[in-house]
């Protein structure tokens, strides 16, 4: 198994600019994190900054201050290298599937490798087979269930062979069968994984957890400890981080 991909944030912040009469808003406070584990879960309530952090790592937003590097590379100067090294599974995978037929969509991820068409087809089928969905190869992507779309999108990402896989709520609203299939595929991937999730069972399977609240990292450590603390706050058994100082989001 490959070594973890190092991710380093040094005082990295993200601010949404002022638009019309809406004032600028800080989405992620200056954050310093050194992530060097194979499986990392981002936990926390909705709207607290988990997706913003993933989008920052994926190069979809730029830091308004500070710096971010993935495997020693930065999006501002190394975008071409990072596009092949980082893949993101979005919360809405319907928008992630581009081609009308499942197999064609997976093949699209293989085009940068400049393989002959028959090899792309064989590799796409192999990726679908590995996830137990080869039967969907000739299906329209518009006919898939939510769980099937998630698995097809994941097959396309795996085909591109990223070193770092980012996943935003990958098991949300899935039935148990598809939830387990997606979780197993993510946890069993050769790529390093950073997953933002409300699925605390999935988070518990990771090596490290980062709790984000109010756009800040409020805790970082063993998943079991952070999940227990997060549950206590969510159930009103303990204050939310920052509540005692008036800094709660």
Image (cartoon, rainbow, N blue to C red):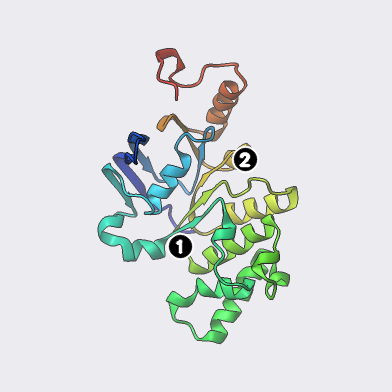
Say which of marks 2 and 1 sits in front. 2
Answer with left or right where residue 147 lies relative to residue 246: right
Other-residue count near label 1 (Cα within 10 Å), few / some / many at <14 / 14–19 / ≥20: many
Q: Is residue 56 above or below residue 117?
A: above
| Residue 10 as seen in the image, left or right of residue 227 | left
Position of residue 184 relative to residue 208, above or below, is below
Q: Which residue is mark 1?
A: 162
Count of numbered circles in the view: 2
Give the residue drawn at x 62%, y 57%: 150
Q: What is the x, y in percent for residue 27?
A: 39, 37
Name which quarter of the figure residue 218 lies in.
Answer: top left
Give SS at disc 2.
loop
In the rendered view, tell whether residue 73 sits above or below residue 240. Answer: below
Residue 147, position in %: x, y? 68, 55
Q: Quadrant of residue 99?
A: bottom right
- The numbered mark at residue 142 is none
Residue 73 visible in this rendered orientation of the protein: no
Q: Residue furthest front?
A: 21
Residue 82 image position (x, y, % from top left): 36, 61
- The residues tagged by marks 2 and 1 sit, at their Cα atoms, a distance apart of 23 Å
Among all residues in the image, which is located at the extreme top?
244
Q: Residue at the spot x=62%, y=64% of the render? A: 152
Residue 199: which disc? 2
Q: Can residue 189 be seen in this snapshot?
A: yes
Q: Residue at x 33, y 45 (%)?
A: 8
Q: Quadrant of the C terminus?
A: top left
Relative placement, left or right, of 197 versus 53 is right
Sequence-wise, the earlier of marks 2 and 1 is 1
- Circles 2 and 1, Cβ within 8 Å, touching? The answer is no
Secondary structure under the numbered disc 1 in the rendered image: loop
x and y percent of residue 18 in the render? 32, 39
């Amino acid at each position: 198994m490959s070594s973890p991909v190092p991710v380093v944030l040094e005082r990295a912040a993200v601010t949404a600019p002022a638009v019309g009469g809406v004032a600028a808003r800080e989405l992620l406070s200056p954050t310093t994190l050194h992530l060097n584990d194979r499986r990392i879960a981002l936990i926390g309530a909705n709207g607290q900054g988990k997706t913003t952090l993933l989008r920052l790592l994926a190069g979809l937003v730029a830091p308004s201050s500070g710096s971010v590097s993935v495997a020693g590379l930065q999006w501002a100067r190394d975008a071409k290298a990072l596009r092949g090294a980082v893949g993101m599974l979005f919360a809405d995978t319907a928008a992630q599937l581009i081609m009308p037929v499942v197999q064609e969509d997976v093949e699209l991820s293989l085009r940068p490798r400049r393989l002959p068409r028959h090899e792309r087809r064989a590799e796409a089928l192999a990726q679908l087979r590995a996830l137990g969905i080869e039967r969907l190869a000739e299906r329209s992507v518009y006919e898939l269930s939510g769980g099937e779309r998630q698995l097809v999108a994941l097959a396309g990402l795996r085909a591109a062979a990223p070193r770092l896989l980012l996943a935003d709520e990958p098991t949300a609203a899935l039935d148990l069968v598809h939830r387990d299939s997606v979780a197993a595929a993510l946890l069993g991937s050769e790529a390093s994984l950073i997953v933002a999730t409300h699925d605390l069972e999935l988070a518990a399977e990771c090596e490290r957890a980062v709790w984000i609240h109010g756009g800040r990292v409020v805790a970082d450590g063993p998943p079991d400890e952070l999940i227990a603390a997060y549950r206590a706050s969510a159930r009103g058994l303990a204050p939310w981080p920052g509540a005692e100082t008036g800094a709660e989001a």
